[in-house]
């Protein structure tokens, strides 16, 4: 894979370094244990949009400057990065893929009075209390995972096993699935992978007579070993393996699993057909990445479009540090028009909703995605 930049270090700056620039802090996972592929795609989208905004004249004549910090999926590192970026005078902070990391960043940004636009993290409770400072482009987990649950029910799956790890994000996913499926006749049984190796996971799925096994676990380990074990267990020949969090989206999945990684449905946030802007950006992202861009790359691009719109209204003032910088946003993004609203049960300003699909890799052509369901 061709990385969108030279070396994923802890610091990087894209755009002008002149004193007149408008600085945006960007949080991305670029080293392990962060999901590096997701971070590279997110950064590619952010950087491409910054370049295009600057080529078009910047923000009220001032160039955008992207100050990148690697979170490595570490909440404490992300919070420290937000503090550093605030000291450096950024106008806003953006990015992040991992929900638990984004939550730490959002809390710190809110405490510092710094706007934070979350690109990709979906955890509903992104902040403990409602805030005017934080907004999010990605759909909330409760929305996306209910779409996924509808897909499961429509495909005839009501006995669901979930292989899960200890995490606020995974626990939230289990709760969403259980609360949505139970009134509709579905059951969810948890399999703790800390206590079960892949072979034991297979035994448990058989014992519970589940027809679907969802991977609520990290990638590549233990997700990849579990998939390999299930694919080789004759007792589970008819089982559906699912990955609502999107592990199969990136090329590494296909590289590690080959044909075993196909026909594993996951969530992605793209429309069935991109419009003119989306198609043009998709071509540019492919050139930048050296591979097909994921929905995460489009999220990165749309993030900068939104921030540029907000900053144009307030550059040169104390804003957008004042309240409600998101209420007047109306931006045509790569995946549709973006507006933010206060959504019941969501503590931040939310785009409701980005296009949501359940897709999988085609077993006949693993590099091709099939749309199975749309929310």
Image (cartoon, rainbow, N blue to C red):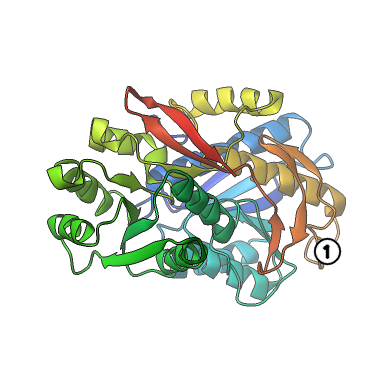
Q: Nearer the viewer, residue 117 or 369?
A: 369
Would you say residue 252 is visible in this rendering?
Answer: yes
Q: Nearer the viewer, residue 211 or 363?
A: 211
Q: Which residue is mark 1?
A: 318
- Residue depicted at x 19% and y 43%: 228
Q: From the viewer's perspective, is residue 171 above or below residue 2? A: below
Q: Which quarter of the figure has residue 332?
A: top right
- Residue depicted at x 50% and y 61%: 184
Q: Quadrant of the C terminus?
A: top right
Q: Which quarter of the figure has residue 265?
A: top left
361 lies left or right of 109: left
Q: Nearer the viewer, residue 32 or 333?
A: 333
Q: Could you say where residue 283 lies in the image, as x and y percent from the top left?
A: 57, 22
362 lies left or right of 270: left
Q: Could you say where residue 94 lies in the image, as x and y percent from the top left?
A: 61, 54
Q: Quadrant of the N terminus?
A: top left
């Amino acid at each position: 894979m061709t990385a969108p930049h030279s070396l994923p270090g802890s610091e990087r700056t894209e755009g002008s370094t002149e004193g007149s620039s408008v600085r945006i802090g960007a949080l991305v996972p670029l080293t392990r244990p962060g999901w590096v592929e997701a971070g590279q795609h997110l950064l590619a989208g952010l950087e491409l949009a910054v370049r295009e905004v600057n080529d078009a004249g910047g923000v009220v004549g001032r160039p955008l400057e992207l100050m990148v910090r690697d979170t490595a999926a570490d909440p404490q590192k992300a919070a420290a990065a937000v503090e550093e970026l605030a000291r450096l005078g950024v106008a806003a902070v953006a990015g992040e893929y991992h929900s638990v990391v984004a939550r730490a960043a959002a809390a710190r940004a809110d405490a510092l009075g710094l706007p934070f636009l979350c690109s990709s993290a979906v955890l509903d409770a992104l902040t403990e209390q409602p805030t005017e400072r934080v907004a999010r482009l990605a759909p909330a987990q409760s929305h996306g995972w209910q779409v996924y649950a509808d897909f499961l029910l429509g495909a005839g799956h009501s006995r669901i096993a979930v292989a899960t790890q200890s995490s606020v994000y995974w626990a939230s996913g289990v709760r969403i699935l259980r609360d949505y499926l139970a009134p509709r006749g579905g059951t969810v049984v948890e399999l703790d992978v800390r206590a079960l190796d892949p072979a034991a996971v297979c035994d448990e799925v058989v014992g519970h007579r589940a027809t679907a096994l969802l991977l609520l676990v990290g990638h590549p380990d233990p997700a990849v070993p579990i998939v390999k074990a299930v694919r080789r267990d004759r007792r589970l020949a008819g089982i559906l393996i699912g990955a609502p969090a999107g592990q199969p989206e990136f090329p590494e999945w296909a590289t590690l699993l080959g044909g075993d990684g196909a026909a594993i449905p996951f969530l992605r946030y793209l429309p069935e057909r991109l419009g003119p802007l989306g198609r043009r950006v998709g071509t540019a992202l492919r050139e930048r990445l050296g591979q097909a861009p994921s929905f995460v790359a489009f999220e990165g691009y749309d993030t900068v479009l939104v921030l540029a719109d907000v900053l144009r209204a307030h550059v040169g003032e104390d804003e957008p540090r004042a309240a409600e910088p998101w209420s007047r946003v109306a931006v045509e993004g790569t995946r549709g028009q973006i507006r933010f609203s206060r959504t019941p049960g969501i503590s931040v300003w939310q785009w409701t909703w980005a296009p949501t699909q359940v897709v999988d890799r085609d077993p006949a052509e693993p590099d091709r995605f099939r749309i199975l369901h749309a929310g």
